[in-house]
């Protein structure tokens, strides 16, 4: 495989064709690893994020197999073109700091993420996140949050965050899995306040 990391835009026809395959891609990956119910749940989440989230509140980052792309037809599926995908959506957050009360913080949430079953354990997921982080730094994002395994996300700069400092949108089943990473000169511990996620993720089922 020759992997290319890129952002997708629904304003680009070729990108949009790939975006339409993402719910099925996520459903297939999670079904293979977690079972049919989880696959349908995450596939539905991705579909909802793509359909209802404003363009400036959603970033779609993918790992593309260029070899598959070069031979793709209009009927190609996500499984033979997309090898990884991560979605970032807006977290509304206001930090009350001593010097700048109410300063708006540009914060995004990483969720969900998937790597094709046949492409796992090759570093694609880590490189995809690292690529995405660089893109968001250029876009002025201050902080990234995610809810996941620190053993994986810790490899790309995330660290556990006290949920009483950066309050998640819902109570967490696993508070130790609330992770953050500052993309600004300030440490992640400098951000104190409550977050509000996009509508589709505003469901205790995902937390």
Image (cartoon, rainbow, N blue to C red):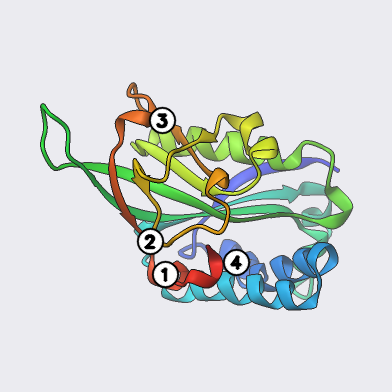
Is disc 2 in contact with disc 1, using a CB cutoff of under 8 Å?
Answer: yes
Q: Please, is residue 55 above or below residue 190 in the view?
A: below
Secondary structure, mark 3, is loop
**Residue hosting label 1:** 202
Residue 20 percent across, percent down from the top left = 62, 73
Task: Please tell me which residue is depicted at 78% across the width and 75% down the height of the picture.
Answer: 75
> Element under label 1?
loop
Q: Are marks 3 and 2 in contact (CB under 8 Å)?
A: no
Mark 1, mark 3: which one is toward the viewer?
1
Of callouts 2 and 1, the N-terminal one: 2
Residue 136 at x, y percent in the picture: 44, 39
Tell whether 186 sits left or right of 127.
left
Q: How many residues crowd around disc 3 within 10 Å: few (fewer than 14), some, or many (20 or more)? A: many
Q: Which residue is mark 2?
A: 197
Q: Residue at x 70, y 78 (%)?
A: 40
Can you identify the residue that label 3 sits on? 183
- Quadrant of the snapshot with the N terminus: top right
């Amino acid at each position: 495989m020759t992997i290319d990391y890129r952002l997708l835009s629904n304003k680009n026809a070729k990108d949009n064709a790939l975006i339409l395959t993402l719910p099925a891609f996520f459903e297939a990956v999670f079904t293979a690893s977690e079972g049919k119910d989880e696959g349908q749940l995450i596939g539905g989440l991705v579909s909802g994020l793509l359909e209802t989230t404003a363009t400036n509140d959603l970033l779609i980052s993918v790992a593309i197999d260029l070899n598959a792309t070069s031979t793709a037809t209009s009927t190609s599926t996500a499984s033979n073109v997309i090898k990884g995908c991560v979605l970032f959506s807006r977290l509304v957050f206001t930090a009350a700091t001593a010097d700048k009360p109410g300063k708006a913080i540009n914060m995004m949430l990483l969720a969900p993420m998937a790597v094709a079953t046949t492409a796992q354990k090759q570093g694609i997921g880590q490189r995809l996140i690292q690529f995405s982080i660089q893109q968001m730094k250029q876009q002025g994002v201050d902080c990234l949050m995610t809810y996941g395994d620190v053993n994986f996300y810790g490899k790309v700069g995330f660290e556990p965050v006290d949920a009483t400092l950066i309050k998640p949108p819902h109570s967490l089943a696993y508070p130790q899995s609330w992770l953050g990473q500052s993309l600004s000169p300030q440490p992640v511990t400098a951000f104190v306040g409550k977050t509000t996620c996009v509508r589709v993720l505003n469901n205790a089922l995902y937390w």
